[in-house]
Image: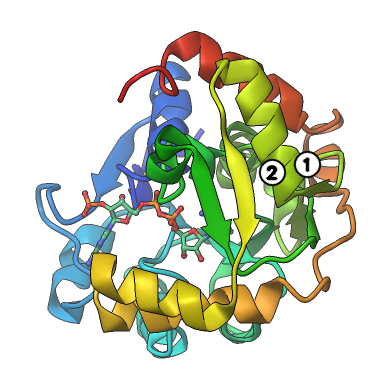
């Protein structure tokens, strides 16, 4: 077995920290990368990338803030070139389902000199417990411009399991896995399931993109508001309202259901805190 370290970019994020924990548990050498790592990795500073990539065997890439961001394709192209120059053997790209820019990033990686696997994931269930929707859940109102669209929320644990397989097993090379949960769920249904599991009132309110952008501009600034509103407008038109079979193809088992995520998260106390 190759003992070159496996580099995890976004090592402190929702998927990255799960991947680090699994690889470490298998006794594999891991190099964690984020702004606080040593050496640091910063997506806004390409001069920090070559040192982090040097000597890495396989690389997991979780871009920030989102592959839908205007600068993402250029960043992914430069990173992929740096990885090839550094002799990286394989690259596993976390991508987003139904996003135009994410598809461009996938094409850049698949046409590169580096062996690769693409993980095209739907919305993470963990957005409700570790991401930007945790605060709304605790406040009791999830307000999104998502209408009654159905989304096959995928569990970040399943994404991490597939990523670890792709980083360590050869038969995933060249594959693109559509990673979804096993069931289509509306945001109203998701709120009701969270409410039931957490034992607290949580409702979904469908709002216009304009209202969403205005609220987000106040909370997070205009750049993030534009990006995230544009992302919602792009993917909440029903294009992702279908199930993918990537978890089964990669792991030979079914993906975790949203109800199981809700039960486990409620039991962890995450939705109890104020
Ligand atoms: N969330 C979803 O539902 C979803 C679904 C499909 C695909 N994706 C993709 O997943 C990726 C991550 O999204 P996420 O929202 O789930 O975030 P996340 O992985 O939970 O967290 C962000 C990670 O990025 C790091 N980071 C933040 N700013 C950085 C910077 N300037 N340079 C380097 N690292 C930085 C953070 O580490 P530090 O703060 O420690 O630096 C952290 O490790 C995106 O590319 C998105 O397209 C997400």
In this view, the residue in front, 92 or 239, is: 239
Cα distance in 3D space between marks 1 and 2: 4 Å
Name the image quarter holding the C terminus: top left
Q: Is there CB contact under 8 Å for labels 1 and 2?
A: yes
> Quarter of the image holding residue 217?
bottom left
For residue 113, say whether it is visible. Answer: no
Residue 223: image location, x then y, percent: 30, 83
State the SS at label 1: loop
Question: In the rendered view, would you say 258 is above or below 45?
Answer: above
Q: Is residue 258 left or right of residue 202?
A: right
For residue 11, say whether it is visible. Answer: yes
Q: Residues within 10 Å of mark 2 (few under 14, many from 20)?
A: many
Question: In the rendered view, would you say 34 is above or below 274?
Answer: below
Residue 246: image location, x then y, percent: 81, 49
State the SS at label 2: loop
Residue 94: image location, x then y, percent: 55, 59
Task: Write the residue at 33% across / 36% down.
Answer: 30
Rendered image: mark on residue 237: none
> Quarter of the image holding residue 262?
top right
- Judged from the image, the quadrant occupied by ligand 1 is bottom left
* Number of numbered discs visible in the structure rendering: 2
Q: Which residue is mark 2?
A: 154
Disc 2 Cβ-to-ligand 1 distance below 8 Å: yes
Task: Write the residue at 36% across / 70% down.
Answer: 216
Disc 1 Cβ-to-ligand 1 distance below 8 Å: no
Question: In the rendered view, would you say 27 is above or below 167?
Answer: above
Task: Write the residue at 36% across / 66% down.
Answer: 64
Residue farthest top in this picture = 267
Residue 271: image location, x then y, percent: 44, 23
Q: Which residue is mark 1?
A: 181
User: Which of disc 2 and disc 1 is earlier in sequence?
Assistant: 2
Q: Is residue 182 left or right of residue 19?
A: right
């Amino acid at each position: 077995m190759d003992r070159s370290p496996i580099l995890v970019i976004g090592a402190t994020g929702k998927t990255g920290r799960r991947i680090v924990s699994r690889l470490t548990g298998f006794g594999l050498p891991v190099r964690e990368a984020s702004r606080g790592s040593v050496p640091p990795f910063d997506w806004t500073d390409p001069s920090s990338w070559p040192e982090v990539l040097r000597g890495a065997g396989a690389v997991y890439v979780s871009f920030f803030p989102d592959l839908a961001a205007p600068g993402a394709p250029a960043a992914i192209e430069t990173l992929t070139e740096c990885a090839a120059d550094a002799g990286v053997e394989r690259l596993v790209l976390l991508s987003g389902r139904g996003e135009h820019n994410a598809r461009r990033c996938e094409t850049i990686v698949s046409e590169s000199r580096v062996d690769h696997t693409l993980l095209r994931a739907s919305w993470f269930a963990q957005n409700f417990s570790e991401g930007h929707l945790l605060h709304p859940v605790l406040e009791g109102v999830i307000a999104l411009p998502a209408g009654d669209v159905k989304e096959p929320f995928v569990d970040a644990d399943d994404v991490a399991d597939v990523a670890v397989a792709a980083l360590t097993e050869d038969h995933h090379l060249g594959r693109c896995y559509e990673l979804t949960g096993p069931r289509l769920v509306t945001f109203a249904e998701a709120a009701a399931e969270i409410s039931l599991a957490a034992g607290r009132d949580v409702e979904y309110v469908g709002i216009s993109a304009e209202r969403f952008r205005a609220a987000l501009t106040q909370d997070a600034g205009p750049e993030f508001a534009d990006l995230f509103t544009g992302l919602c407008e792009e993917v909440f038109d029903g294009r992702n309202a279908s199930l993918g079979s990537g978890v089964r193809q990669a792991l030979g088992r079914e993906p975790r259901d949203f109800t199981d995520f809700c039960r486990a998260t409620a039991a962890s106390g995450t939705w109890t805190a104020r």
